[in-house]
Amino acid sequence: MAAPTFSAITLHVNGEKHTLTVDHRTTLLDALRERLDLTGTKKGCDQGQCGACTVLVDGRRTVSCLQLAVAAEDREITTVEGIADGERLHPVQQAFLDLDGFQCGYCTPGQICSAVAVLREHAAGWPSAATADVRPEAGPPPLTDEEIRERMSGNLCRCGAYVSIVQAVARAAASGQQAEEAAA
Ligand code: FES
Ligand code: FES
């Protein structure tokens, strides 16, 4: 007997549970866009090279065109639709708006999801290829433009809005730090 090629799975997206039956070959990107109508996540290259489809899976950024939906079952998925806190934009979203971190906007959902994860990765002390001192005791490196460019290098922007994108990520990092200092 032929093996089944469809399965019923549960996806947890932006705090909501969705049960759907998918062909095993369905990517997470297609499940989000075509089955759950979450079209904020964009399809650029569909082969892992542009970052337009970036979402967070268990808090880590993932190119959803390279992940099968069945492999994302029961994991916490956050798309750009789930980044804001209700009506309050995430500092990264606000900074992209304030500093024009986009032109056509097609790459922007992926840039925003990536930037949210970059700030977390940096705060957790993860080094990048641009980090001069990678010893754990050195702590997080200064989030220079070079660090931001390296950490965001998986997200391409065909409009070339990179200068504003880097500024927006730096602004969001600074506003996050100010909020932390105010709360301390
Ligand atoms: S659409 Fe996934 S990386 Fe380009
Ligand atoms: S804003 Fe157009 S591709 Fe980035």
Image (cartoon, rainbow, N blue to C red):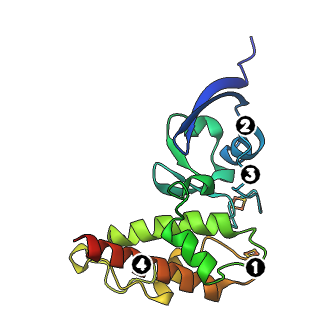
Going by the numbered disc 1, the residue's amino acid type is: Gln
Quote the CA–CA distance across marks 1 and 2.
33 Å
Q: Which circle's residue, 4 or 1, is located before the other in the chain?
A: 1
Where is residue 145? Give x, y as percent: 50, 88
Q: CB under 8 Å between callouts 1 and 3?
A: no
Residue drawn at point x = 49 percent, y = 71 percent? 91
On screen, 152 above or below 87? below
Please tell me which of labels 4 and 2 falls first in the chain: 2
Amino acid found under the numbered disc labelled 4 = Ser
* Viewer-proximal residue among 153 and 57: 57
Q: Specify whether residue 164 is in view.
A: yes
Mark 4 near mark 2, Cβ–Cβ under 8 Å? no
Ligand 2's image quarter is bottom right
Name the side, left or right, on which 183 lies relative to 128. left
User: How far is mark 4 from mark 1, CA to CA?
Assistant: 23 Å
* SS at circle 1: loop
**Residue 165 horizontal/vertical position (percent):** 61, 81
Point out the tag, 2 or 3, that comes first from the N-terminus: 2
Using the image as rendered, state which of residue 135 and residue 1 is in the foreground: 135
Looking at the rendered structure, the kind of residue marked 2 is Arg
Q: Is 24 rendered above or below residue 105?
A: above
Q: Position of residue 68 (x, y in %)?
A: 64, 41
| Residue tagged 2 | 25
Q: Earlier in the sequence, mark 1 or mark 3?
A: 3
Callout 4: 10 Å neighbours few (<14), some, many (20+)?
some
Give the number of the disc on residue 175: 4
Q: Is mark 1 within 8 Å of ligand 2?
A: yes
Name the residue that disc number 1 marks. Answer: 103
Q: How many numbered callouts?
A: 4
Q: Which residue is mark 3?
A: 39
